[in-house]
């Protein structure tokens, strides 16, 4: 799969790259999420990156506490985005807040944190609604 992704990038075949990304998305789990995330960014595969973010959100406890380098890699992702925003000239970076009313209106949210928050919001909204079929769809 990875060789096919490299070839499709070399031959400028974006549809093939997207197809390979779709196949790779089915293999994303807590043990390889950061490697596949790096790959998705290298080849600008937005849907694969979304799949990685979804896995990070739903498996965050496992990633941070149970994998060998999960916490360091997760912190590195947050730091990478904070540095990128800082380089763009944003004056304030809001990385995390337990309460939304504590977030200043002019604070810039990190994209990865916002995406994780959205996945968790979607997941837990379905839990509150009690629709178990939709919960399974979101979890997968």
Image (spheres, rainbow, N blue to C red):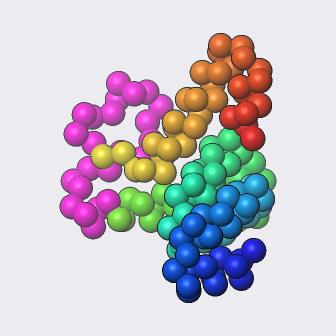
What residue is drawn where x is 48% and y is 57%?
78
Q: What is the x, y in percent for residue 96? A: 44, 42
| One can see residue 40 in this view | no
Please indicate whether residue 5 sits to the left or right of residue 13 in the image: right
Q: The magenta stretch spans which residues? A: 85-107
At x 68% / y 41%, what residue is drawn?
Answer: 58
Which of the 4 image quarters holds residue 137? top right
Q: Is residue 77 magenta?
A: no
Residue 15: quarter of image: bottom right
Q: Position of residue 135 (x, y in %)?
A: 72, 27
Q: Is residue 101 magenta?
A: yes
Instruction: State the quadrant of the C terminus.
Output: top right
**Nearer-the-camera pick, 133 or 109:** 133
From the viewer's perspective, tell me whether residue 46 is left or right of residue 35.
Answer: left
> Residue 18: where, in percent of width, then height?
60, 64
Question: Does residue 63 appear left or right of residue 88 in this picture?
Answer: right
Residue 62 makes an appearance in the image: yes
Q: Residue at x 44, y 65 (%)?
A: 80
Secondary structure mostly taken by the magenta-highlighted segment of the chain: loop
Q: Position of residue 7 (x, y in %)?
A: 64, 84
Q: How many marks?
A: 0
Which quadrant of the figure contains the N terminus?
bottom right
């Amino acid at each position: 799969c990875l060789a096919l992704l490299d070839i499709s990038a070399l031959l400028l075949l974006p549809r093939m790259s997207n197809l390979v990304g779709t196949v790779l998305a089915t293999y994303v789990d807590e043990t390889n999420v950061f490697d596949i995330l790096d790959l998705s960014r290298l080849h600008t595969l937005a849907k694969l990156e979304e799949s990685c973010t979804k896995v990070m959100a739903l498996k965050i406890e496992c990633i941070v506490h149970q994998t060998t380098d999960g916490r360091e890699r997760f912190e590195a992702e947050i730091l990478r985005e904070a540095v990128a925003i800082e380089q763009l000239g944003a004056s304030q970076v809001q990385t995390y807040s337990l309460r939304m009313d504590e977030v200043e209106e002019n604070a810039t949210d990190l994209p990865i944190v916002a995406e994780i928050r959205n996945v968790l919001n979607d997941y837990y909204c379905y839990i509150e609604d009690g629709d178990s079929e939709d919960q399974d769809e979101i979890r997968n």
